[in-house]
Amino acid sequence: MFQRGRQKLNKWQISEIVQKALSEDLPFEDLTSELLVEDNLHGEAYFLAKEDLVVCGIPVVEEVFQQVDGTVELYFEVSEGEEVPKGTKFGFARGKVKSLLKGERVALNFLQHLSGIATVVRRMQKKLSPYGIILLDTRKTLPGLKVLQKYAVRVGGGQNHRFSLSDGLLIKDNHIKACGGLEKVLEKLGRTPHYAAVEIEVKSLTELSLILESEANISAVLLDNFSQKDLEKALDMIKRSGKKLLVEVSGGVKEENLDKFLIPGIDYLSSGAITHSVKAVDISFKLDKVWKV
């Protein structure tokens, strides 16, 4: 249900995504570079952090330039997931100037977006860790970028919730509505064999009471959009019940309002904002040296 680890990206996971991005930006030729830049002009460029950030997306940048021109050489002075201060030149690219210019924007788009996610997640997780709370992402990802966005969450120090509908049983409000109410859902769970962990979204203290009184095999509850007062009541109810339930809290969670969720007893805090609304960090790609060969 909750995915741990800092799994690396595999080439097959990113090659198709990069190919599509390049075909959007470079369907035929780079008209400006073809007109102005000589074929025998080579150069070196650097990636510059224009704000404090967590670097994420180096394997994607490498794939971009590999597909543009396999002779481009890349060198990064930092590791994936490393924090770098504003003003740091943290990576270098060397090769044909035409190739550097062709890959520049697509490489930056990936690098800025993924580093933006990792940077926000790192800051949020640092605040949550003293309370024993783990930051989770959601399935609220941008179409086609899920694998990269969830990777960036891991690099930032968070964990992944389900990658897909096939990864676990998460019973939400529409499932409950479709089944005719929470009581019927709990009844069905009690008499239907299942082998995956079950998490149920809870909208009220009344619903939580029904779950705590049920004999159904439930692993976790998702307390969604609870007021702070009701959230504290819910955590107390779970504690007094003696049931070993993981507690996930969601509902408008973002960096700006994180303080109100710093409550002992919460295991996971999930946020859609860290993938669907994150701001790209400011990174530039500057051509530094040029020469003819």
Image: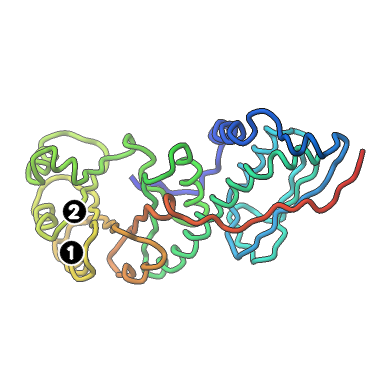
Labels 2 and 1: the sequence-earlier one: 2
Quarter of the image for the C terminus: give it: top right
Secondary structure state at the residue bearing disc 1: helix
- Label placed on residue 202: 2
Whether the residues at callouts 2 and 1 have beta carbons within 8 Å, the answer is: yes
Q: Amino acid at mark 2?
A: Val
| Residue at x 23% of width, y 57% of height | 223
Q: Using the image as rendered, state which of residue 266 and residue 112 is in the foreground.
A: 112
Q: In the figure, is residue 16 to the left or right of 181?
A: right
Q: Using the image as rendered, state which of residue 166 and residue 101 is in the foreground.
A: 101
Q: In the figure, is residue 215 to the left or right of 96?
A: left
| Residue at x 34% of width, y 59% of height | 269
Work out how far the residue at label 2 is from the one at label 1, CA to CA, in angstroms: 10 Å
Q: Residue 152, percent across and down?
A: 51, 50
Residue placed farthest to the top in the image? 28
Quarter of the image for the N terminus: give it: top left
